[in-house]
Image (spheres, grey):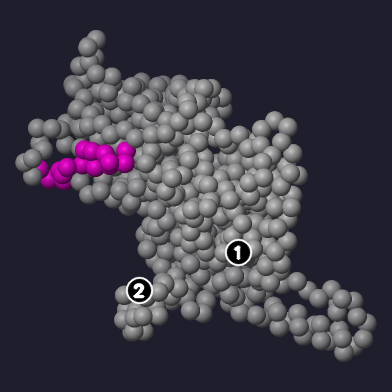
Amino acid sequence: MNAGPAPSSIFAVELIAEFVRRGVSDFVVCPGSRSQALALAAAAAEQAGAIRLHVRIDERSAAFFALGVARETGRPAPIIVTSGTAVANLVPAAFEAHEGRVPFIALTADRPVELRGRRSNQTTTQAGMFSEIARLSLDVPAPTGEPATSGSSSFTEPGQLAAQALSASLGALHRAPAGPVQLNLQFREPLSGTAGFDDMIAQGFAVAGEEGVEARAIHPTLLVPSIDDATPDETDPTLYVHGDNALTVVIAGAGAGAEAEEFAREAGLPLLAEVVSGSRYGREAITAYASLIADPEVGGLIERAIVFGHPTLTRQVPSLLERDDVEVIVVDPHTDTDHVQPSRGARVVRAARVADGHDPHTHRRWLGAWVAPDRELQRERSSAHVPDLEAARETGYKERNAYARAEMAARREPVTRAMLVESAWLGTWPHDRLVIAASRLVRVLDGIAPARKVTVHANRGLAGIDGTIATALGIAVTSQADPDPKKAAGTTRVILGDIALLHDVGSLQLPPDTEVTPRIQLLVGNDGGGTIFDGLEVAASASTDTFDRVMLTPQQVDLEALAHAYGWAYERAETRVELERVFTAPVTGPTIVEVPLAR
C-alpha cells in the first residue's frame, strides 16, 4: 500500500507554485539530500513549462548565477540548496546582492530543531546566517502535513512565505532596497515522497505557470503591493531643480540607470557617469570626468553635486564629495538603509525632478565648460584606429604606398588595454549585454569610453572579482529567453582579467544540453597576474620580489587548455586585426578570447 505524499513534498510544491503564480520565472538548484523535496518540486514545475530551471554543482557559483538572472530581469531567481557548508557558500553573492541592491532569495534546507546542537551530520548554525543584511530571514518549522489552524502563523504557510519573501527581496517592505532573503526550511524524514500526488503536481504547476506568465506580463512588481510615494515627508523630499546659478554636476554610479541621464538632459547639466552606471549616453555625458574634476578651472568650480547610484571607480569623485565648498545631494528612494550617504552631511532625497518651465539652456555655458575639454581629451586618449582618409585619396604611387604601409602597421599593432576595452565598448550593440569585472580593465574603460547607450552589468556592490563568470552566464541565459526576439538574439560579452577568470574558473562548467547554450564571449586580458595593484602606493615602497609574491599573484595557466577542458571555444587576439575579427565574427556559443597584455 502506498503511503500518502510526504509533508515535505506537499510544502515544497505549494511554496514553489506560489512563487510561480507571483511571476517568478527562474529557479536555481544545487543537488542535495535535505533539499530534495524543493528540488523535485522545481523539476516538476520545469516539466510543466512553468519555469526555467538551472542546475549547478557549486553553490557559490550557482548563487552568482542567480544574481546574474536577477540583474538582467529585475526578478529574483530563488536558489535551492541543502544544509551545511552549502548555505555558507551563498554568502558572497548574498553580500553583493545586499550592497548592489539586487533581489535574491535563498531557500536553504535544514535539519529540524530537535536535531540541532547534537553535531548531527551537515548541521550547523545556518538559520539567520544572513540576518545582518537580509531583508527577511525566517527559520521555518518542519511541515507536519496537518491542516493549518486559524491561529497558526502566516510564516509557516507556504503561500504566505513565498509572498513575503518575494515582497522583501524586491524592496517592497519598509522602503528598503532590493536585496537578499533567506527562508531556512526545516525538513523531517521522509524528505520527499509524492505517491498519489503526481497528477496534482502537474495540474497545479500548469495553472501556476499560466498565472505566472500573466503576472510577468501585466505586473512588473510581480503582484507585490506598491508603496505610495504621493506625499514625501519633510525629512525625505523630492528635489526640484530650478534655473538657479549654482554650478551643478550630476554624478551617476552603479545602478543609476536611465533616471540619471534623463535628469541631466532635462536640467542641462554635465553628467559624470561611470561606465558601469547605465547612464553613460546622451550629449551631457562627460567621458573624461575624472580628469576634469581634478582640473581647478573646471572641477574646481563645482558648487553642487547630485548623486545617483553608487560611484566606486575613481578617487576623484569621493574627493569632490568631501569638499567643504560642495553641496552634496543623494537621490535614493529608500529610507530604510544605512548606505546612502557617500559624504558627511549629504542631503538625501527620494527623487530629483526638473521644475516645470525650467530651460535647460540656462546652464549651457557651464555644460560647454565641460564638453569642450572633454572632447579634446577624448581625441588624445582614444585607441580607436582612424584611417588617414586624405592619404587614401592620394593618386601618387609613393603616397599610396606610404598609406598602405601605415595601415598594415596599424593592423599589426599589439593589443593594449585601452584597445581591448574600447573595442568591446564600441563592438557591443543595443541588443547585446556587456558585463565588466572588477579588474584593472574597468578603470581603463571608464577613462576612455565615449557616450553610448550600452546595456551594462557589473557587480559593483562590493566590487569583488567573485563570481564574474557565473553572473555573466546568468545574464546570458536569461537575456536569450527575452520575449523580444531582437533582444534575445544578442551576445553577452565579458571584460575581465586573468585573475578574475581563475577566481571563478569552476563556473566554466556548463550544464548538459537540457539547458540553453549561452552565447557568451569572455574577453580575458591576460597580463600574468593582478597588475591592478601596480598603481598602489605599496608598489613604490615594497621590494619587487615581495610585491610580486603577495600582490601580483603571478600565474602561468594555459588558458587554451583550460577552455578545451570545459568545452569552451578558444581564440587568441594579439594584434588589432585579430581583435577586430573577434568583434565581427558571430558568437554561437561559449568562447574564451585570450588577449595577451604587457604588464
Which residue is located at x 73 percent, y 82 percent? 408
Left of 573 or right of it: where is 360? Answer: right
Between residues 115 and 461, which one lies in front from this camera angle? 461
Furthest-top residue in view? 150
At 36% from the left and 84% from the top, the residue drawn is: 544
Q: Residue at x 51, y 56 (%)?
A: 320
Disc 1 target residue: 296
Residue ranking furthest to the right: 395
Part of the protein shown in magenta: 120-134
Q: For numbered disc 1, what is the local secondary structure?
A: loop
User: Front-most of 52 and 77?
Assistant: 77
Residue 144 horizontal/vertical position (percent):
18, 22
Return the residue at label 2: 551
Can I make out residue 35 in this image?
A: no
| Residue 478: assigned label | none
Q: Nearer the N terminus, badge 2 or badge 1? A: 1
Q: Quadrant of residue 426?
A: bottom right
- Judged left or right of residue 454, residue 83 is left
Within 10 Å of disc 2 (Cα), the crowding (few <14, some 14-19, many 20+) is: some
The answer to if 242 sits in the magenta stretch is no
| Secondary structure character of the magenta stretch overall | loop
Q: Secondary structure at mark 2?
A: helix
Q: Quadrant of residue 141?
A: top left
Q: Residue 435, relative to residue 479: is it above or below?
A: below
The amino acid at mark 2 is Met
Q: Is residue 361 above or below residue 144?
A: below
What is the x, y in percent for residue 138? 26, 31
Where residue 487 appears, as percent x and y from the top left, is 63, 44
